[in-house]
Image: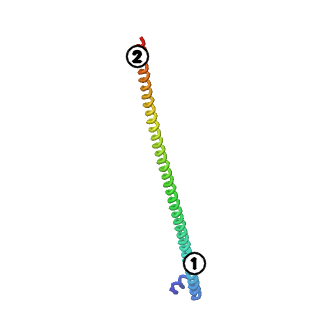
Amino acid sequence: FFIKWQKSNKGSIINYLQHLLQESGQQAARRASLVEEQQELQEGKAEVERMRKEQLERAESLRKKNEKAEVEAAAKRKAEVEEIEQARKQLEEEKRLMQEQASKANKELEEEYKRKAKEQARKELEDERKAEELRLQTDKRR
């Protein structure tokens, strides 16, 4: 290799050794650069992993908050439904009581009407009987 190099570069052994030294220095620099790049890559991977973990933690935290909010919303909806159902039952009970009262009032009015009608009929019969008695008495006097 040296002879080939010497012919093409027309240099001495010292130049060749300097050339080799220079190449070995460049290789050492490349190796150092590669080691540095490797280290930066490892640091970058560690940073990415840390960021991924943080993102997972945030996602988990958000998921828990969402679940809690959903549970609270469901409980609120359930309470509202129960409240509406209770109000509906109360209205139905009030309606039933009002219907009972109206029915009772109608029955009382009907009984009062029948009683008055009977009383009126009795009075009319009494009046007819009295009128008949008066007629008989006037006929006897004649």
Residue 103: x percent and y percent? 44, 38
> What amino acid is at disc 2?
Leu
Q: Relative to 133, say whether 64 is above or below.
A: below
Q: Relative to 131, say whether 119 is above or below.
A: below
Residue hosting label 2? 136
Q: Residue at x 42, y 26 (%)?
A: 122
Q: Relative to 26, say whether 123 is above or below.
A: above
Q: Residue at x 53, y 68 (%)?
A: 57
Indicate the secondary structure of the residue bearing disc 2.
Answer: helix
Label 2: few (<14), some or many (≥20) within 10 Å? few
> What amino acid is at disc 1?
Glu
Residue hosting label 1? 36
Q: Earlier in the sequence, mark 2 or mark 1?
A: 1
Depth check, mark 2 against mark 1: the one in front is: 2
Q: Residue at x 59, y 88 (%)?
A: 14
Residue sticking out furthest to the bottom: 13
Q: Of residues 122 and 55, which is closer to you in this image?
A: 122
